[in-house]
Amino acid sequence: MIQKIKNCPLCGSSNFIFFSNLKKNLYSEIISKIIDLNENYLIKKIKNYKCKNCGIIFKNYWFDDKILEKIYNSFVIHHPRGQDFKSNLFSKRGLSSAFSNLLIAKKKGDIENENRYSRTIKSIIFSIPNYNKLKSTNWISANSRSFDSNLNIGLLKKNINKIKNLINEPVEFKRFSGFESKHLWKYLNQQIKIKSYAEVGCPQWGLFGLVKNKKIKKYFIKRNEKNFWGKKCKINNSKNCILYKKEKTNFKIINYENLPKLNLKLDLVSSFQYIDHLREPFKFFENLNKISESQAYIVDNYKSFDNTIYIQHFTGWSSKPFFWVANKLNKKIKNNFARIKNTENDLFLLT
Ligand SMILES: [Zn+2]
């Protein structure tokens, strides 16, 4: 069910040290049910280690494919952040309904839903421009994450009406805006002349919507996922998420497993918040490097927040492991996209 990890999943080294403990979240709740282990025990048993050679953070135990399939095929079938991309949950109405659901759950002592709506409300607030500087929202701690459910309900109650009035356009690189950012596209084009472009990972939240009318070749790379974005991941409970996005933005679907046969040479492949799910990340880097000149990776910026890699992510990424990869593949790293700094994300471009 869970397997001990004996070597660094990126470089293979066995020289690693303790890095951090886990925090509870939606996935620790779900996984503890699936494998029938007490949640407190589970988050104590699984820890984050740091490889002394390449600098990647990884879990001392990781789940086998059967468990991963169970999580993503039966428990969290639809990728929540993909569903929320451009959804109307980010609205006065959305906040009101999450708030009343939170109060109901609290009254009933329904901790699961109390946590769930706390996280929803936090991600709504985090999408408000400059929320950390405004009087009605700055009481949320600066290093609080959208993954955890820590929320002061008393202070929320006090400020809820003022918060509703702050809701307008969600800021970029957050739950409701995803990575569909014109600033990101502009930045990438300043570095690379993009005539052909592909994405792998969640098809909803990337750049396809922004480039749909541009004269470039567009591809979605479909992997045989033990993850979201598989057969069952649907938008509005009806359409497969990949086909839904394809209809709206018109890309060609290619299979990851067939890449070696396709003889492609793309200008850029992007993968946004994806590589931390991979069991063998270096193989993935190598494969994308074979079919493209440059690769853009957006990863969770754990270092600027609480230094925790949550239970659903096998690995944690920062400059050091990217430099290790770049060195192996004989590539250069760019990590200077200013607008993404201080969000929960960071961008590494391999060219
Ligand atoms: Zn390593």
Image (cartoon, rainbow, N blue to C red):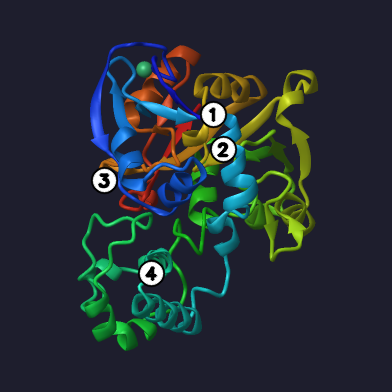
Say what secondary structure mark 2 lies in.
helix
Image quadrant where residue 116 sits:
bottom left
Instruction: Specify the farthest residue to the bottom.
Output: 161
- Residue type of the residue flagged with mark 1: Asp
Q: Say whether disc 2 or disc 4 marks the residue closer to the N-terminus.
A: 2
Residue 199: percent from left, percent from top: 63, 40
Q: Which residue is mark 4?
A: 114
Say what secondary structure mark 4 lies in.
helix
Image quadrant where residue 332 sits:
top left
Q: Which residue is mark 3?
A: 304
Say what secondary structure mark 1 lies in.
loop
Nearer to us: label 2 or label 3: 2
- Residue type of the residue flagged with mark 3: Ser
Q: CA distance from mark 1 to mark 3?
A: 30 Å
Q: Quadrant of ligand 1?
A: top left
Q: Are marks 1 and 4 in contact (CB under 8 Å)?
A: no
Classify 2 as above or below 90.
above
- Residue type of the residue flagged with mark 4: Glu
Image quadrant where residue 136 sits:
bottom left
| Residue 312 located left or right of residue 145 | right
Foreground of the two, 144 or 199 = 144
Residue 351: percent from left, percent from top: 50, 26
- Badge 2, how many Cα within 10 Å: few under 14, some, many 20+? some
Q: Are marks 1 and 2 in contact (CB under 8 Å)?
A: yes
Q: CA distance from mark 1 to mark 2?
A: 6 Å
Residue 124: percent from left, percent from top: 41, 70
